[in-house]
Amino acid sequence: MKRGTLATVAALTLIAGNANAAFSGTFSLSSDCDYRGFSQSAEDFAVQGSLEYGHDSGFYACAWGSTLDWGQASDADIEIDYFVGFSREFGGSGISWDVGYLAYTYPGLSSANFGEFYGGFSWDAFSLKLSYSDDFAGVGQSAWYIDGGYKYKWVSGWRVFVYGGYSFGNAFDRDNGMAFGFPELWNYGVGAGYAIHKLYFEAKVVGTDLNAPFKIDDGVFANDFRAVFSVALSLP
């Protein structure tokens, strides 16, 4: 998902001059780069990082990047995504809404670039979001993605989570030629994490409900049941 340039960093630095603004970032190492149930790094290690900006008004912006492996025939070896959005709480109800736009970019393979609008709600440990792209993954067809999850945290630093999502739309439509190469599908994830100081450790299992001939057991774009381990450092 995400990208960063010196120009982006400079622009965000100027915005951060506001006393009500805050900057943060992450650096992480993961055993796999998973996206909606598909491996983006051929089940190999991925180096990832992010730069985030948040304002008291609810506005936020982020640049996120990861190494990729889409096989020898692809020129995409890195993904950098940008997103901007706005999130607020409904009074003191504990229910929050979130809307924004996410741009997926792939230096070296610009034909795969695409944008996605999203909107969602969260309450306590529950979340629900709907995303839409009019040119999903650069295949020229639209797609929708609805996902929800539950995450529970303890004061000790431990947390558990479960989530699921459903990908559908013209890009996945069998009658429309399946431009994305796969039919409509469910993806899922279940895991646990532990935060201590500025470090966060996580282990989860992910996968999809795809069967043959669309199920990929290993390697590039693997979408079977598999484990993912990661460690992240929060900055500053």
Image (cartoon, rainbow, N blue to C red):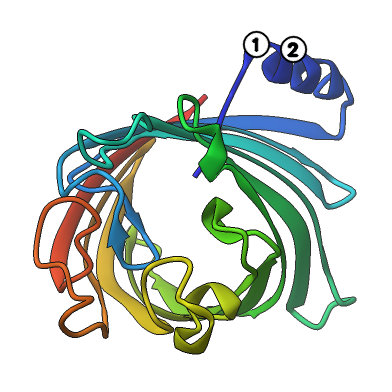
Distance from disc 1 to disc 2, alpha carbons, whole Å, reads 6 Å
Amino acid under disc 1: Leu
According to the picture, the residue beneath numbered tag 1 turns out to be: 6
Q: Which of the numbered marks, if any, corresponds to residue 31?
A: none
- Tell me if label 1 and label 2 are in contact, CB under 8 Å: yes
Q: Residues within 10 Å of mark 1 (few under 14, many from 20)?
A: few
According to the picture, the residue beneath numbered tag 2 turns out to be: 10
Q: Residues within 10 Å of mark 2 (few under 14, many from 20)?
A: few
Q: Is residue 9 above or below residue 137?
A: above
Query: In this rendering, does residue 2 appear at all?
Result: no
Q: Secondary structure at mark 1?
A: helix
Judging depth in this view, the residue of 19 and 42 nearest the camera is 42
147 vs 94, left or right, is left
Q: How many marks?
A: 2
Query: In this rendering, does residue 176 appear at all?
Result: yes
Q: Quadrant of residue 188?
A: bottom left
Residue drawn at 19 percent across, 85 percent down = 211
Q: Quadrant of residue 12?
A: top right
Estimate the x, y position of residue 127 in percent, counting from the top left.
Answer: 58, 78
Residue drawn at 18 percent across, 75 percent down = 215
Estimate the x, y position of residue 46 in percent, counting from the top left.
Answer: 26, 36
Residue drawn at 25 percent across, 36 percent down = 73
Amino acid under disc 2: Ala
Q: Residue furthest bottom?
A: 175
